Amino acid sequence: GCSGFSWLQSLCQLFELSAFSGTWLSSPPCEIFKKIEEPAAATSSSPANIKKLKISSCQHSNTYASYYCTISMDGNRDQTVYSATVKGIGEWWEARLAAPAFVAYLTIYNRLSSASWLNKFNLLVDGVECNRVDLTEPFSIANFTCNAFGSAVRVVTQLSNHLVICEVEIYGY
Ligand SMILES: *[C@@H]1O[C@H](CO)[C@@H](O)[C@H](O)[C@H]1NC(C)=O
């Protein structure tokens, strides 16, 4: 069909009807149509596409004992089973997505008996911070928004204890 414009009145009819769902400007007499990109429309249509993203592998800055990073990506949401790094500000857990994606948010399952150790942490995607979390009350299970595109999703503790995580689920598209 027509892309952009046509000088012939009859060709104006060839614009696909489906293309008229957005906002269009029409310059009389009909020949020029210009679609206005609407970011609001793009974001409002995306939540329907949000799904759990596949994690292919993980890494720890420094694993504590046998509390391997994989324990936080094994599908087990049990809040007594966890991965852990050695103690220290800046220690991290990182997931590698099976494919680069838009990371909308993370759902983190916390270890209840040490929940306050996850009160302060940063989220990064491909090395760029997408959220800075600083809670006054510990959480049990919570969503943390990110809204960044990439393939390496990292949780970096800002507290001096072990970084302990039961499970991380990454949602996006
Ligand atoms: C996280 O967000 C999703 C999607 O909005 C929602 O279904 C889920 O209940 C939320 N989980 C928590 C723990 O708030």
Image (cartoon, rainbow, N blue to C red):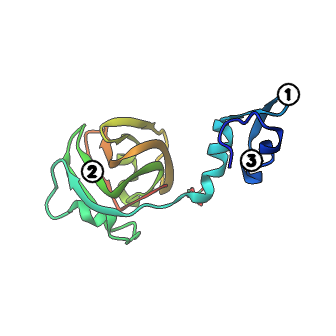
Q: Residue at x 20, y 62 (%)?
A: 68
Residue at x-position 35% and y-position 67%: 80
- Give how far across and how far down residue 73 sits, in percent: 33, 64
Please say if the residues under marks 3 and 1 sit with CB atoms less than 8 Å apart.
no
> On the image, numbered disc 2 is attached to which residue?
93
Which label lies toward us, 1 or 2?
Answer: 1
Would you call the spot at circle 1 few (<14 residues within 10 Å), some (14-19), or many (20 or more)?
few
The numbered dot on residue 158 is: none
Classify mark 3: residues with Cα within 10 Å, few (<14), some (14-19) or many (20+).
some
Mark 1 near mark 2, Cβ–Cβ under 8 Å? no
Which tag, 3 or 2, sits closer to the chain's start? Answer: 3
- Residue 28's disc is 1
Residue that carries the numbered disc 3 in the rendered image: 15
- Image spot of residue 72 (x, y percent): 32, 62
- The amino acid marked with disc number 3 is Phe
> Viewer-proximal residue, 150 or 27?
27
Residue under the image location 68 percent in, 43 percent down = 41
Q: Secondary structure at mark 2?
A: strand
Q: Up-down: is 112 above or below 44?
A: below
